[in-house]
Image: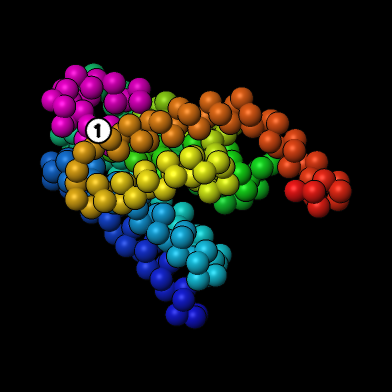
Amino acid sequence: MSWKYLVPNGFTALSLVVGLASVTQSAAGLYESAAWLILLGVILDKLDGAAARMLGASSEFGAEMDSFADFVVFGTAPAALAFFSLTGGIVEPGEGFIGGACAVYTLAVAIRLARFNVTDPEGGSIFFLGIPTTACGGLFAAGWLAANAQGVLSTAESAFPVILITLGLMMVSNLRIPKFSLRWSKPVNAFLVVNLVIAFVFIPLRMYPEYLFFQSSLYLVVGTTWATLRGGRILADEAESLTDPGVAESK
């Protein structure tokens, strides 16, 4: 294997280790640290994909490794954060719903990753089909940290099981959400780049989780709304450009 494959696969391996560390932090009761490690996994997930594209080092092995890492970081770790922070590791009578919600979320992550690996949905170069595991895991971790920072965690915790189930259903749904890409207008491109830089600064420094939660929520709400309203037209235009050489050349 060429050395260039070591770079993206190294980021992936580090992401998997970070996910395992997050689980151990949750089990030890260090929930804030566990949540920040999940967000660090978001950065590493972006870096391994960017490195693979820049170096021309995409591979089937790397794709499989990436799925394993995503399952740990964005499937197991958020479920562990919710489970241990809500139960302390012991499910008391009447708390079965919490364990069930964590199981539903984790199973949804596995299904989402498996479907992503074996299918090539229409418009796959533009949209994700189903909300990505990275977005869901990052949203939950940022939400936990934001609630903790604002002193409302004890109130927000009662909604965590429902939130986990909702995120799980969104991952395996047919909802579309646009992929990050500098293909839109200049103001939108500038907004994306600025917010990406902010995330890459705030997460390692463990700063302003409220803004990170706002970022994640904005992407989810605006992205799914835009894809619902405009996605059909965009997919039709893409199909037309592929079947009509004249249209393809004009674009």
Question: In the picture provided, is 131 more to the left or to the right than 121?
Answer: left
Question: In the picture provided, is 8 more to the left or to the right than 174?
Answer: left
Question: In the picture provided, is 18 more to the left or to the right than 120?
Answer: left
Q: Is residue 241 above or below residue 86?
A: below
Taking the spot 16% from the left edge, 31% from the top edge, the residue there is: 148
How many circles with numbers are drawn on the protein? 1
The image quadrant that residue 91 belongs to is: top left
Position of residue 75 measured from the top left corner of the image (x, y, whole percent)? 37, 43
Instruction: Find numbered disc 1 in the image and state the secondary structure of the residue it sits on.
Output: helix
Position of residue 23 measured from the top left corner of the image (x, y, whole percent)? 24, 48
Position of residue 162 measured from the top left corner of the image (x, y, whole percent)? 35, 22
Residue 162 falls inside the magenta stretch: yes
Query: Amino acid under label 1?
Result: Glu
Q: Is residue 147 visible?
A: yes
Residue 147 falls inside the magenta stretch: yes
**What is the chief secondary structure element of the magenta stretch?**
helix
Which residue in the structure is indicated by mark 1?
210
Q: Is residue 27 visible?
A: no
Taking the spot 40% from the left edge, 27% from the top edge, the residue there is: 165
Q: Decide which of 200, 60 is in the foreground and name it.
A: 200
Taking the spot 55% from the left edge, 70% from the top edge, the residue there is: 56
Q: Is residue 234 above or below residue 162?
A: below
CA neighbours of label 1 inside 10 A, class few (<14), some (14 to 19), many (20+): some
Q: Is residue 130 above or below residue 72?
A: above
Taking the spot 42% from the left edge, 48% from the top edge, the residue there is: 193
- Give the extent of the magenta segment: 142-163
Question: In the picture provided, is 123 more to the left or to the right than 223?
Answer: right
| Colour scheme | rainbow
Residue projecting furthest to the bottom: 2
